[in-house]
């Protein structure tokens, strides 16, 4: 793939001069990188999707199980901040996970209005079943890409996160500190 140079030009804006061959190659390389991201995501979620479908669950359930598993005791408000979904959507997903015995809610000790979420043993089992194929896929991709791949990939992904949220996301993934 050709080197990709960053442009300060906004998407869809027009240039006054025609693109050079090098600019066209850079634009094509950028489009290919974006398309690869779509294909990689499709395949990254394919194994968990099959497990979820067999259990009558979907990707929203997966995200909740993942973040509750990574952050035991997370509050509903904190989870809403991470997932950026409506309260109604989260309430529906949580209700299903609680009814299936995958997540339990505990009332906050300091603030009784807070609901702290924890995976049950069955929820932990589901979380592991969903995570193993993804861990395997990512580990193989990083190994196959070479010794510096993990750090470069992390830099690329963190730079895809909105500027004003990077610090909070980095704290969440490295220290388990919920923003």
Image (cartoon, rainbow, N blue to C red):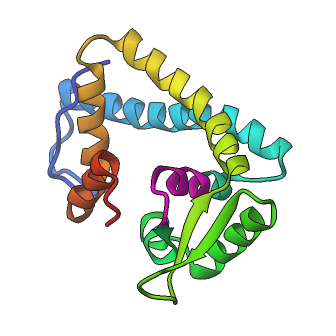
**Residue 135 x %, y %:** 52, 28
Residue 115 is drawn in which quadrant? bottom right
- Residue positioned 60% across, 54% down in the render: 65
Vertical relation: 90 (above or below) 159: below
Which residue shows up at 81% across the image and 60% down it?
Answer: 100
Q: Which quadrant would residue 87 be assigned to in this image?
A: bottom right
- Camera-nearest residue between 130 and 154: 130
As drawn, the residue found furthest toward the front would be: 109
- The reply to whether the magenta stretch includes residue 13 is no
> What x and y, as percent, mark residue 58?
72, 53
Q: How many marks?
A: 0
Q: Seen in the image, is 131 located left or right of residue 100? A: left
* Residue 124 at x, y percent in the picture: 64, 45
Height in image: 4 above or below 176? above
Q: Position of residue 46 (x, y in %)?
A: 67, 34
Give the prevailing secondary structure in the magenta stretch: helix
- Give the answer, above or below, for where 25 lies relative to 144: below
Q: Residue at x 26, y 62 (%)?
A: 165
Q: Residue at x 21, y 36 (%)?
A: 19
Looking at the picture, tell me which residue is in the foreground, 128 or 49.
128
Highlighted range, magenta: 63-73
Q: Quadrant of the N terminus?
A: top left
- Quadrant placement of the C terminus: bottom left
């Amino acid at each position: 793939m050709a080197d990709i140079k960053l442009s300060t030009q906004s998407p869809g804006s027009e240039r006054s001069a025609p693109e050079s061959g090098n600019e066209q190659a850079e634009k094509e390389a950028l489009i290919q990188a974006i398309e690869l991201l779509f294909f990689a995501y499709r395949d990254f979620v394919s194994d968990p999707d099959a497990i979820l479908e067999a259990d009558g669950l979907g990707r929203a359930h997966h995200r909740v199980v993942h973040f509750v598993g990574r952050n035991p005791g997370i509050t509903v408000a904190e989870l809403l901040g991470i997932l950026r979904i409506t309260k109604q959507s989260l309430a529906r997903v949580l209700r299903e996970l609680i009814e299936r015995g995958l997540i339990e809610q505990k009332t906050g000790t300091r603030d009784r209005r807070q609901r702290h979420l924890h995976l049950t043993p069955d929820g932990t089992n589901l979380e592991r079943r969903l995570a193993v194929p993804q861990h395997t896929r990512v580990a193989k991709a990083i190994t196959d890409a070479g010794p510096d791949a993990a750090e470069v990939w992390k830099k690329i992904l963190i730079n895809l996160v909105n500027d004003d949220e990077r610090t909070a996301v980095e704290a969440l993934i490295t220290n388990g500190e919920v923003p």
